[in-house]
Amino acid sequence: MAQQLESSVARVSIIDRTTQVYCHETLDCPSYVFLIENPQGKRALFDLDLRKDIESFPPVIRDAMANLQMNANKDVATILSEDGRVLPSDIGSIIWSHWHCDHSGDPSTFPPSVDLVVGPGFKDAFLPGYPTNPNGLILESDYAGRQLQEIDFTNGPRIGGFRAIDLFGDESFYLLDAPGNATGHMCGLARTTPSTFIFMGADACHHCGSLRPSPHHPLPGTLTPSPFSIPAHQPGTSCRKALLEAIHPKHSPTQPFYSQLSEAPGRDVPVAESTIQNMMAFDACEDVLVVLAHDKSLLGVVDLFPTEVNEWKRKGWKEAGRWRFLRDFTDAACNVSVS
């Protein structure tokens, strides 16, 4: 079986465009793009991050960005062209996990031969784009002159609670119906070896604290190195479970730090929470590396484009990255006294 699945392994790279996103001076995070290539040479990009010319966004989006500071130095097409091994014209499809501006990028920087793939309900919700629709949330130039494919999950298989589509038809890369956070939201699941996968979480949740700890992966008795050390994760440092439980909102070793979503425009909270529950099962599996779109805790752990990430399990990235998100709770840890 493993030998048979060798022909179903995708080559995967993670592109970090060093996009800067600041929200009320509190949030600074990456925004990952995935390059996927199946064994037959079909290539897809999962998300495009932020477009470089943010002044070109539709007026509704520009108004919504009034309290944000966002900028991108290069678009994905330029990054590919500069590297030279995979050119924009080599891409078969751009997949939007969802329509939000820090994921949709600028498809017009790719030739018309590149399809745009979107999730269920997208066309009814967002077409036509701006300027035909003055209140449009996307641009007509995003899809003009190219095939716009809306995924229908109706007859697809189920994988771990998600409705799925085998995009290339060879079991190397699946799109997963992951609704709740936004209309048409999808995740990706790429086979990185015959028995391992990378789960592209997009914005199904925004922080690893929504997935961890869990009954499958409780807080450890001792965490080494300590995420609260200075500098962070200094070798030889450690912290005890008592401290981790003390800073947990529910003081629980088996419940995620963030267990209840807040209301937000376009978010269906019960549906989004169901999607996160399905993600937790993948996150608990030792053969699946979950990468959320804006997970800064993985910076310095995972290799970035042009290096491929297929050997993530052999390199121990899951173990190295699992608890790094706790760094975000440093202030709380410094104010807690445990015996």
Image (cartoon, helix red, strand yellow):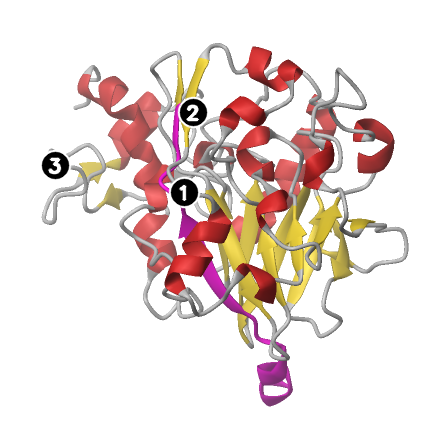
Mark 2, secondary structure of its residue: strand
The residue located at (85%, 50%) in the rendering is 152
Whether pointer 2 and pointer 3 mark residues with C-beta atoms closer than 8 Å, the reply is no
Read off the residue under disc 2: 70
Give neighbour class at mark 2: few <14, some 14-19, many 20+ (Cα, 10 Å).
some
* Rendered position, 32 above or below 112: above
Q: Residue at x 59, y 16 (%)?
A: 262
Front-lying residue, 175 or 232: 175
Name the residue that disc number 3 marks: 231
- The quadrant holding residue 56 is top right
Decide if residue 331 is on the left or right side of residue 98: left
List the residue tagged with mark 1.
Answer: 74
Amino acid type, label 1: Lys
Residue displayed at 82% across by 29% down = 128
User: Is 298 in front, or is 76?
Assistant: 76
Residue 311 falls left or right of residue 272: left
Numbered disc 1: secondary structure: loop
